[in-house]
Amino acid sequence: MDGISLANGYAYIANEIGGSVSVCSVGSGGSLSPCATSAIAPGVMPSSVAVNGGQAYVYDSNNNNMYLCLVGNLGALGSCMISNGGTAFSGAIQIAIH
């Protein structure tokens, strides 16, 4: 487990080795309740995730790509596509949205 992002009542946890992002509901006391797994794409190793409204950016440390995903029902990530903007990334550590 590497990157964690909190947004819209959910915790998004990058599972680099598992190749997915866990989406967990955050309770009023801060506890995490049932988590669902969102696969990004085959061969992807998510190491960081940032959520901005209905979109999430996920960095793939295996192929140095940035993925743009839509945030759907219950916070699940889907429709992920490479979104590098013509830039080659190499070993990015964190994503921030300002």
Image (tube, rainbow, N blue to C red):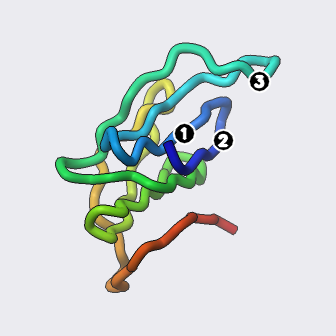
> What percent of the width, then of the height, locates residue 22?
46, 33
Q: How many marks?
A: 3
> What percent of the width, then of the height, locates residue 52?
59, 53
Labels 2 & 1 near each other (Cβ < 8 A): yes
> What percent of the width, then of the height, locates residue 98?
69, 68
Left or right of 66, for residue 43: left
Q: State the mark number for residue 75.
A: none
Q: Residue at x 49, y 21 (%)?
A: 35
Q: State the mark number for residue 12.
A: 1
Q: What residue does disc 3 label?
A: 30
Q: Element at badge 2? A: strand
Identify residue type, mark 1. Tyr
Q: Element at badge 3? A: loop
Q: What residue does disc 2 label?
A: 6
User: Which residue ends up furthest to the top in the rendered image?
Assistant: 34
Can you say whether 49 is above or below 78 in the image?
Answer: below
**Which numbered disc flags the more N-terminal residue, 3 or 2?**
2
> How far apart are labels 3 and 2 at the CA level?
11 Å
